[in-house]
Image (cartoon, rainbow, N blue to C red):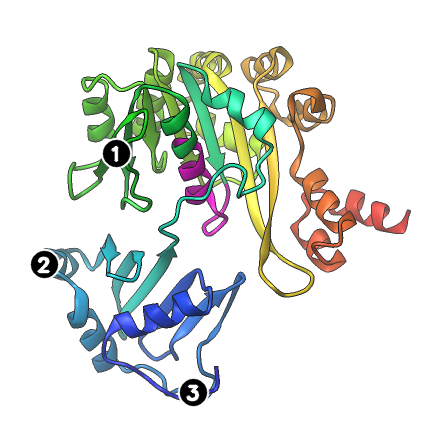
Amino acid sequence: MSQIQTYDNVDTYLQIGIEFDCSDIHLATTSRPTWRRFGNLQPIWEDAATLTAQDTESLVNSFLPKEHWEHLKEKGDVDFAYQTDFGRFRVSVVRQRLGYDLVFRIITTEIRSIDDLKLPKEHIVPLTRYHNGLILVTGSVGSGKSTTMAALVDFINEDREDHILTLEDPIEYVFKSKNCHINQREVHSHTESFPRALRGALREDPDVIVVGEMRNLETIQLALTAAETGHLVIATLHTGNAPRTLDRILDVFPTDQRSQIRIMVAESLRGVISQQLIPKADGTGRVMALELLVNTAPVAATIRDGKTFMLPGIMQTGKNVGMITMDESIKNLYIAGEISQEEAHFRSEDKKLMESYFKS
């Protein structure tokens, strides 16, 4: 955008972000107003003035409710969901050395379906029809985990007649009960923490529990217990692929517990969906690369034995149940002309193998 402008209300920036199909808006002290568009972070206006500490404090004052102001003053940061008549946003406000920094994640209020996201429906749907177990949706920040998880929940909402309980920080997508009864709880607003909410969840007779993020040992332990005791648990982790996801779960436990935890994970895991969003070759947006691990007998044995390094090989031979590695997904996107060779190389796990493919 060529317009040079700063505003004293966050809503104007957010409307601009929605209009230009951005994922995030950054309003930071000593920086120009910035957006993340198609995965790239860049100034909204190249010649805009930088925001001063006074500017960002005015912006915080323009929309922050009193209770969040109190939390910000006491703790130095606050995260919450912000709703306007034109959209919904996940907000992070932090106090830093020079002033305040504000980051807004734009939440698409329309819940996209499994078909809309081009997820492999014939292999994903069977995972959602289990009545117990653990489904993990993983990826880095901004990889679309929340969108995928919302699609899974929305499908279950239509496909089953059950009680779905979501535990989120903050609530992003808002669901309306269809064939299922849905309760949504926001950490810090409706409950103190994920572990507390999970302990409470087991007394609320849910069939499906959605955990916004498995952040720590206690949350992971409670999620595994819930998955073992007759609940389908859908949760997210900030990991890049299936082997790293399983290693992350196991590594948070003390060494003397890991053997038992490996058995629990081997028995309760249903599948791992790992994803990343890659800029399209034509610059018109981003496309999803998706890795899928389905828990088959060989996968379970590998987890029990602590040999997660063998999973990529097993996934190569598990295509009949939909398994695909991240590198294979990336290669398919490159073959289809959707992403550039540079992006395919940059995003791949095994770069030497990808290079040999380019030369062949």
Q: Is residue 147 magenta?
A: yes
Sequence-wise, which precedes: disc 1 or disc 3? 3
Residue at numbered disc 3: 3
SS class of the residue under badge 3? Answer: loop
Mark 3: amino acid: Gln
Q: Position of residue 201 (x, y in %)?
A: 22, 23
| Image point (47%, 13%), residue name | 259
Mark 1: amino acid: Phe
Residue at numbered disc 1: 194
| Image point (18%, 43%), residue name | 188
Q: Main secondary structure of the magenta part?
A: helix
**Do the residues bearing badges 3 and 2 touch, measured as CB atoms within 8 Å?**
no
| Image point (40%, 88%), residue name | 4
Closer to us: 9 or 350: 9
Q: Is residue 224 magenta?
A: no
Highlighted range, magenta:
139-153
SS class of the residue under badge 1? Answer: helix
How many neighbours does mark 2 have within 10 angstroms: few (below 14), some (14-19), or many (20 or more)? few
Closer to us: 232 or 199: 232
Sequence-wise, which precedes: disc 2 or disc 1? 2
Query: Between marks 3 and 2, how big is the CA–CA gap?
Result: 35 Å
- Classify residue 164 as left or right of residue 245: left
Q: Position of residue 39 (x, y in %)?
A: 53, 61
Query: Between marks 2 and 1, how big is the CA–CA gap?
Result: 22 Å
Q: Quadrant of residue 52?
A: bottom left
Q: Position of residue 347 (x, y in %)?
A: 65, 50
Camera-nearest label, 1 or 3? 3
Residue at numbered disc 2: 70
Q: Position of residue 197 (x, y in %)?
A: 21, 30
